[in-house]
Image (cartoon, helix red, strand yellow):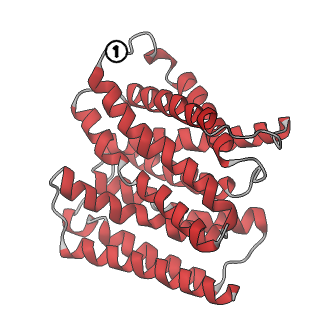
């Protein structure tokens, strides 16, 4: 796969994740619990991904027991990110939850540094600094003046950043010889098992006949558990981990724009300035990577 196509796949996966706050906020407004949203999300994602895998007749010739184990362990990061990120949205404003999630940018550098013993280049560090500056501005925390965070929301937000960074890193590392369809399906299987265990107490009272719940869960599933792992599985193995992290920052402008268009939330000039900085960081890192590969 060419680097340009891999970049496009990672961008689509990250941008898709930017739509999840819309459905999560709608779900909480309708009175659904964190467990109900996560269970329906992963159930829908499980059905959709395995159905697509059988439709395309994905080959499992390279699949081994060890590969299954490592893929499913990586898949738990998808489930954990959903739990922690949606939990942060439940206790914090969307902008604050997003800025906490986007701490994955610098956390991703330490994943690569720790596991691959790869010191980040000056260009990568520059793009990360610009990205973090853009995230800070785009979060609108200065205008909102919310400097005190509920402890539980802060914990959820930082944990979501850690697990999201782990997913981005490991999705490009484990069992890359296995077709992306099967990898994504196994990942969501692990996520579903994890979610069912954590929210076991919500299973008996789950309103399975509630169409609105499945509509919300379906939206969260599509943009939070189907498209991101699928497109990351296609693109991440062909990119450096640092580049994948920077590309994933596209999630923030997508989240802001979708909130503005769908939820009618206003976006300040300060926030748009942050979005422009993030885009600048993406361009900086992409141009540098292309030149080095020539």
Q: Quick check: 179 left or right of 217? A: right
- Residue 141 x/y as whole percent: 27, 65
How many discs appear?
1
Return the residue at label 1.
207
Above or below 63: residue 280:
below
Between 288 and 159, the one lying in front of the other is 288
Q: Where is residue 129 in the image (x, y as percent from the top left)?
A: 49, 79
Q: Judging from the image, what secondary structure is the residue with disc 1 in?
A: loop
Q: Please identify the residue farthest to the top as the structure is shown.
A: 204
Q: Residue at x 40, y 75 (%)?
A: 278
Specify whether 131 is left or right of 193. left
Observer-nearest of 142 and 173: 173
Decide: is 195 above or below 140. Answer: above
With 209 as the anchor, is 83 left or right in this view? right
- Picture quadrant where residue 117 is located: bottom right
Q: Nearer the viewer, residue 47 or 202?
A: 47
Answer whether residue 32 is visible to the viewer in this image: no
């Amino acid at each position: 796969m060419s680097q340009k196509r891999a970049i496009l796949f990672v961008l689509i996966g990250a941008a898709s994740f930017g739509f999840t706050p819309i459905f999560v906020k709608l779900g909480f407004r309708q009175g659904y619990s964190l467990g109900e949203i996560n269970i329906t999300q992963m159930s829908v994602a499980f059905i959709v991904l395995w159905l697509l895998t059988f439709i395309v007749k994905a080959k499992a010739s390279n699949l081994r027991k060890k590969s299954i184990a490592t893929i499913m362990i990586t898949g738990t990061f998808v489930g954990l990110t959903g739990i922690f990120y949606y939990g942060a949205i439940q206790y914090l404003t969307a902008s604050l939850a997003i800025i906490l999630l986007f701490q994955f940018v610098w956390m991703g550098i330490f994943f690569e540094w720790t596991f691959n013993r790869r010191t980040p280049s000056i260009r990568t560090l520059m793009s990360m600094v610009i990205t973090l500056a853009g995230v800070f501005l785009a979060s609108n925390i200065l205008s909102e003046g919310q400097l005190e965070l509920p402890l539980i929301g802060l914990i959820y937000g930082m944990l979501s950043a850690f697990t999201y960074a782990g997913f981005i890193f490991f999705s490009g590392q484990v069992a890359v010889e296995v077709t992306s369809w099967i990898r994504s399906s196994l990942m969501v299987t692990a996520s579903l098992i994890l979610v069912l265990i954590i929210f076991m107490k919500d299973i008996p009272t789950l309103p399975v006949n509630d169409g609105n719940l499945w509509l919300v869960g379906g939206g969260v599933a599509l943009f939070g558990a189907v498209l991101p792992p699928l497109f990351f599985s296609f693109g991440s193995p062909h990119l450096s981990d640092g580049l994948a992290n920077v590309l994933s920052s596209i999630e923030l402008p997508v989240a802001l724009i979708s909130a503005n268009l769908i939820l009618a939330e206003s976006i300040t000039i300060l926030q748009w300035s942050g979005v422009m900085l993030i885009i600048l960081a993406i361009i900086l890192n992409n141009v540098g990577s292309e030149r080095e590969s020539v």
